[in-house]
Amino acid sequence: MDAGEFTRWIAMAERTLSSAVGDAERGDFNWACFKAHQAAEFALKALLYGVGMPARGHSLTHLIAGVSRLVPVSEDVVELCRLLDKFYIPTRYVDAWSEGSPFEYFSRRDADAAIKAAEEVIKFVKGVWRSLSGERS
């Protein structure tokens, strides 16, 4: 167990989630959605790096599959990862849409759902880490 590596990645997850909340408050909903994905990605990588299973890539669906080799993962958490994966590309790239720009396609509801999903993934990761490392909550 590498607590230092876990702490480094989970701190980035929390900081990125905070930035997503700020984006949502400013009405930058596409960026809030993207950063929520990033926060969950950093959290899942925190766990994987922390247990000595460094992970590459950006697919939360694949990262959570790696986590499932360590501990049982509920279908609810898997679904949160699938939801967040949908925010990785189209939130940022103008050419992801045939017309308009990404900021035109995302709403407060999208941002709120993405932030909530990322919060739940981070909560799950922290719980798993506590369990595996023997930490008390």
Image: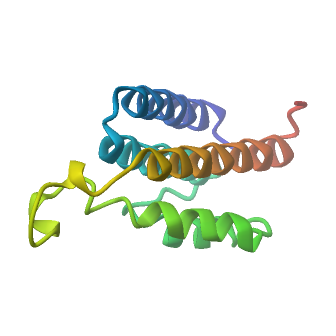
The image quarter containing residue 53 is bottom right
In the rendered structure, the answer to whether residue 100 lies left or right of residue 135 reads left
- State the quadrant of the N terminus: top right
The colour style of the image is: rainbow
Residue at figure coordinates x 63%, y 42% from the top left: 119
Q: Relative to residue 45, is residue 98 depicted above or below? A: below
Residue at figure coordinates x 72%, y 41% from the top left: 126
Which of the pair 57/74 is nearer the observer? 74
Q: Relative to residue 93, is residue 120 depicted above or below? A: above
Q: Is residue 63 visible?
A: no
In the rendered structure, the answer to whether residue 64 lies left or right of residue 126 reads left
The image quarter containing residue 79 is bottom right
In the rendered structure, the answer to whether residue 28 lies left or right of residue 12 reads left
Q: Is residue 6 visible?
A: yes
Which of the pair 56/1 is nearer the observer? 56
User: Where in the figure is residue 3, as x and y percent of width and height?
Assistant: 66, 34
Residue at figure coordinates x 57%, y 52% from the top left: 44
User: Where in the figure is residue 94, as x and y percent of width and height?
Assistant: 11, 58
The image quarter containing residue 77 is bottom right
In the rendered structure, the answer to whether residue 17 lies left or right of residue 29 reads right
User: Where in the figure is residue 56, as x and y percent of width and height?
Assistant: 39, 61
- State the quadrant of the C terminus: top right
Residue at figure coordinates x 39%, y 49% from the top left: 107
Which of the pair 93/66 is nearer the observer? 93
Q: Relative to residue 8, is residue 98 depicted above or below? A: below
**Number of numbered discs overlaid on the protein picture:** 0
Q: Relative to residue 137, is residue 57 depicted above or below? A: below
